[in-house]
Image (cartoon, helix red, strand yellow):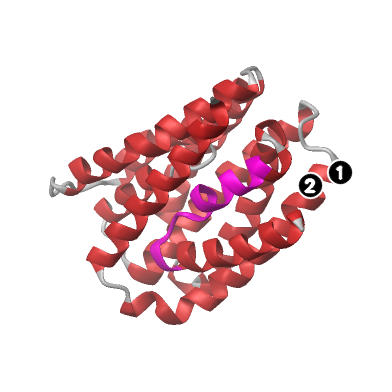
């Protein structure tokens, strides 16, 4: 039953994230925590996120901006490994608390960023990759931060989805390798990650047909609702 629950939520999360560019980790993480506990859920989500981002790259392969991807990844990959190592040193309730507070805080932060007509270049992507990479290692999902960064760079629709996914792929691979080296990514955890990731991959391909029809205001409301619900769930688990 736990596997079926994870697969069902994963399919919905993969479809939504395939449309808006983020959200799969935010939606799926509370379910994984409920089913497997926070310490096991984080490496499971890391494996699933690798698969989810890879599927978005396959769906939009021709539109990846590889220069932007390289600028973001060159600093983000080592930062994600450092963040993952920091995470492993934290107690389980602190992990829940940190993730929950982060997700809730991202709602007003995203609105503040949206009110400014900011433009980003390759140097901004490199700096953003370092900061977001480290946070990704600790709090599972930083899509609410990486999404506006790539939008400010000038990417949209398929190019945005593909480039953000290609950039995030390196971060989650780095995070997964770190978990494996420090004993957190066992064969059982990897299998659970592959199961969750398969549903996210399927959802990403289902989402492709809907991308051109999503209204911006629907996207904003959807992300706010997802982040608040997931953040409150994590805080509930922490206490």
For label 1, the residue is 187
Q: Is residue 152 left or right of residue 150?
A: left
Label 2, secondary structure: give it: helix
Secondary structure mostly seen in magenta is helix
Residue situated in front as seen by the camera: 204 or 99: 99
Q: Is residue 145 above or below residue 7?
A: above
For label 2, the residue is 190
Residue 46: name its quadrant: top right
Queried whether the magenta region covers residue 23, the answer comes back as yes
Q: Is residue 192 left or right of residue 214?
A: right
Q: Is residue 88 left or right of residue 189?
A: left
What quarter of the picture does the N terminus occupy? Answer: bottom right
Label 1, secondary structure: give it: helix
Queried whether the magenta region covers residue 237, the answer comes back as no
Residues at circles 1 and 2 in contact by the CB criterion of under 8 Å: yes
**Cα–Cα span, label 1 and label 2:** 5 Å
Give the magenta part as a residue range.
19-34
Q: Is residue 213 left or right of residue 170?
A: left
Crowding near the residue tagged with mark 2, few <14, some 14–19, many ≥20 C-alpha atoms within 10 Å: many
Question: For the view shown, which residue lies furthest in the bottom direction?
Answer: 209
Residue 140: name its quadrant: top right
Q: Position of residue 151 (x, y in %)?
A: 29, 55
């Amino acid at each position: 039953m736990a596997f079926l629950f994870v697969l069902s939520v994963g399919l919905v999360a993969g479809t939504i994230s395939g449309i808006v560019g983020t959200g799969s980790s935010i939606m799926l993480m509370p379910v994984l925590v409920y089913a497997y506990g926070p310490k096991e859920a984080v490496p499971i989500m890391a494996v699933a996120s690798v698969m989810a981002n890879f599927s978005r790259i396959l769906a939009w392969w021709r539109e990846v901006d590889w220069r932007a991807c390289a600028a973001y990844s060159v600093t983000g990959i080592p930062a994600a490994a450092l963040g993952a190592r920091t995470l492993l040193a934290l107690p389980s309730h602190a992990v829940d608390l940190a993730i929950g507070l982060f997700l809730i805080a991202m709602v007003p932060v995203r609105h503040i960023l949206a009110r400014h007509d900011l433009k980003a270049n390759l140097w901004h992507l490199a700096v953003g990759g370092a900061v977001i990479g480290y946070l990704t290692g600790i709090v599972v999902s930083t899509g609410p931060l990486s999404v506006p960064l790539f939008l400010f760079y000038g990417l949209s629709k398929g190019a945005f989805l593909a480039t953000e996914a290609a950039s995030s792929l390196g971060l989650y691979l780095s995070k997964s390798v770190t978990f494996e080296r420090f004993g957190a990514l066992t064969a059982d955890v990897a299998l659970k990650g592959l199961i969750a990731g398969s549903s996210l991959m399927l959802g990403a391909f289902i989402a492709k047909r809907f991308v051109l029809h999503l209204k911006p205001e629907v996207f904003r409301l959807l992300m706010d609702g997802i982040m608040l619900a997931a953040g409150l769930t994590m805080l509930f688990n922490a206490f």
